[in-house]
Each structure stands twice: as C-alpha cells, then as structure tokens.
Image (cartoon, helix red, strand yellow):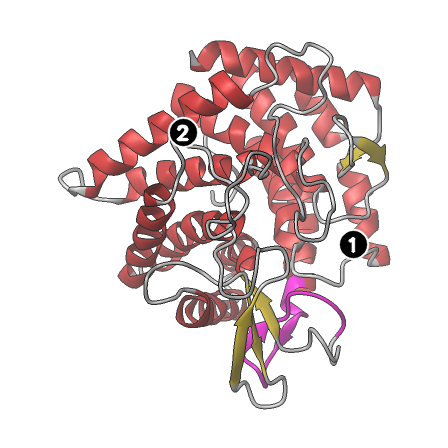
Amino acid sequence: MWQAAIDNAILKVKNNIMKHPGKLPHISEGQCYDWGDNGDWIEGFYIGMMWLAHEYSQDPFYKEAAESYLANFKDRLDRHVALDHHDIGFLYSLSAVAQWKITGSEEARQVALQAADTLVARWRPKAGIIQAWGLEGDPENGGRIIIDCLLNLPLLFWAYEQTGNKIYYDLAYQHALKSQKFLVRGDASSYHTFYFDPENGHALRGGTHQGFEDGSTWTRGQAWGIYGFALAYRYTKNASFLDTSKRLAHYFIAHLPEDHVAYWDFDVPVEKDTPRDSSASAITACGLLELLELIDAHDPDRIIFEAALQSSMKSLVANYATSDLPDAEGLLKHGSYHVRGGIAPDGYVIWGDYYYLEALVRMEKGIKGYWYK
C-alpha cells in the first residue's frame, strides 16, 4: 500500500520539476500551485521532497534538481529576501542541511550555517524568545512566538553539533522551554501564538492567527507541537519534552473524526462544508513516527500511537491522496492554509505534501526527514 502511494507521489514530484523548471510552488486558491520565485516561507518543502524522492528511488534526476536550487537559496540569504520571520528552519533544513546530509557538500553546510546565524539574529534577549514575525520592535509582533517555531529549532541544534558554538543550543533550548510553558495548556491542547512584553518578557496572553478563535486548538499548530517537542527531546534529552509531545499526541488522536483526518480546528463547529486540514494529519503522522522511535518498547502508548498512525495514513492514502488525478500538482487534497482569513481554505499545500511523503518513505524504507543528522 505504501509503495504504490510513494511511486505515485514521486512521479508527481518529477512532473512538477519538468513542468516548472527553476520555479517554486506557492499557495494558491485553486487546485494547483502558483509557481514563482523564492520569497515565501514554504519553498524548502519542495526541495525536501526532491531529496526524499532521491533517497527512495536513487534516481539522480531528483538529486540534480535539488542541488540546482542551492545557489538560489544562498542568494536569498545574502540579500535577506523576505526573511523577517522564524521560518528559516523550514527553508534551510530541508534544502541546505538535507544536501549536506546526503552529499556531504561543504557549500551546502556553509549555507545552512549562514541560515542558522540569520535565525539567531531573531533572538530577543529582553523577552527571552525567538521573535516569530516582523522586525525587531514591531508593535504587534515584537514579543510574539508561535508554535510552528518548534520545527525551526532543529536548524539551531544542528548548527551547535556542527560548530560546538553553544549559543545555537542555548537559544533553541530556551525557546523550546518557553514554548512548552506558555503554548501548551493544562489539558494538552495548544495556543497557536503567545504574546510577551518585548521589554521585560512578562507573559501577556495566548491567542491565534489562523485558528478558529484565541482559545481554540488549531490542528496544524497541535501537529507542529507533537513533532517539534519530540525533536526537542531528541536533541536535548529533556524528558519533559518527550512527555509534552506524547500528551499533545493523545489530545490530537482523541479529537479526530471518524475518518482519522483532522478538521482545520478542533473547536470549530463541524458542518457539511467545514474544511479539513490533511496537512495537520500528515505532520502528526511524522510526529508519531518520531515518538515511536523515541519511546520505550514496552511503553503502553506505543499501541495507541501505532494504531493512530496506521489509521491516519491509510485514510490519507485512500481518501485524500491525488493518486487518481494524474495531472494533479499536489499530493494531498483538502489541505488548508488560513481558513479564518479566507486564504486557500481547501486545496493543495506543499508542506502537507512534504510531510505525507516523509511519513510514507519512513514507513516503507526507514528514510527520515532532515531535522537531524
């Protein structure tokens, strides 16, 4: 079942590379991608898919395609194009770090370290956070974190392993601790975002940007937390991070609908046309795979996580994959970007495609993503 799904997925990756040479997929309102230049937070996912396809198939076509983008990503760093956000890890873990990991390229390693330095520059010592969005001193975002940043921290942990410079480790660790304390609620649901006073770090309030309301649980945010805290545990061995990831996973699993694929928010009223977010379930599948590697063989949660992983992935393959649509550019239907804002509430999203493929190749061949060596 997984092999057929992977074969279909990597064929679509190849078709996209050939149809849109040198271009990168952007979020669109339709059932296709808007192809353009490197200026958003999502382009790394497409390069990561090329590397996964190469590792799975050993077809040099994917390797050559992925490598061809490195200069583009280096230029973006040099000119600081649309990098006033924390998603530098999403961009460069899946492009430059992946290339170094697979090929040993010193050029890719240096690009990745430059990216890590760019992310470090977003540290705000007065607040004790990595600022999510905007320039330093931004009146709205100057003291803001969002749960997505947990997947950007591996770039800093990796940079520490490469250089021995503890500043990378310390900032990532402190940000993970603050995210754990303020983004995770007592019932193991999560805030999408949290605000601090940028001058003294005092906690102000939790909120949302893309969820249903401030007190709701945006499903993609919950998914970032599952995978992100599991990765934080892998790097730090702080057992509380593993426990937090497990608690978030239990909450996610317990609130799924009958077909095991999440709606866009766990608290939104479910009606006939309520959008799903297949990407949230794909991210969670990768998080569950990570947890299954990290927990003890006799951990009672193993049975629960295994069953949830199988149910979710079977549903994604059978009901959400575009295997029956040969001309589709996306791998998963019914991904959502910003439902509350009316932006791409139901379509293809490249991060959903990436995590779906990561989960598939990990289940079939043990090939992991590029969040660590």
Q: Is residue 299 above or below residue 48?
A: below
Report whether residue 104 is seen: no
Residue matched to label 2: 312
> In this picture, which residue range is highlighted in magenta?
119-135
> Which residue is pictured at 83% across the width and 23% down the height?
20
Residue type at mark 1: give it: Leu
Front-lying residue, 24 or 109: 24
From the viewer's perspective, is the residue at label 2 or at label 1 nearer? 2
Tell me which numbered mark, 2 or 1, is placed earlier along the sequence.
1
Residue reaching furthest to the left:
298
Residue reaching furthest to the bottom:
200
Q: Position of residue 46 (x, y in %)?
A: 68, 33
Could you say which quadrant of the image residue 69 lies in?
Answer: top right
In-image side of 307 versus 360 (left or right): left
Q: Do callouts 2 and 1 mark residues in contact (Cβ within 8 Å)? A: no
In-image side of 21 versus 336 (left or right): right
Q: CA distance from mark 2 to mark 1?
A: 37 Å
Front-lying residue, 347 or 3: 347
Rate crowding at label 2 as few (under 14), some (14 to 19) or many (20 or more) other CA atoms within 10 Å. Answer: many
Residue type at mark 2: give it: Ser
In the rendered picture of this protein, how many numbered marks are placed on residues? Answer: 2
Chief SS of the magenta region: loop
> Which residue is pictured at 65% across the width and 63% down the height?
119
Confirm whether the magenta stretch covers residue 133: yes
Placement of the N terminus among the 4 image quadrants: top left
Rate crowding at label 1 as few (under 14), some (14 to 19) or many (20 or more) other CA atoms within 10 Å. Answer: some
Q: Is residue 303 above or below residue 314?
A: below
Q: Is residue 367 above or below residue 109?
A: above
> Which residue is pictured at 66% across the width and 52% down the height?
340
Q: Position of residue 83 (x, y in %)?
A: 76, 58
Residue 77 circle label: 1
Q: Is residue 130 above or below residue 105?
A: below
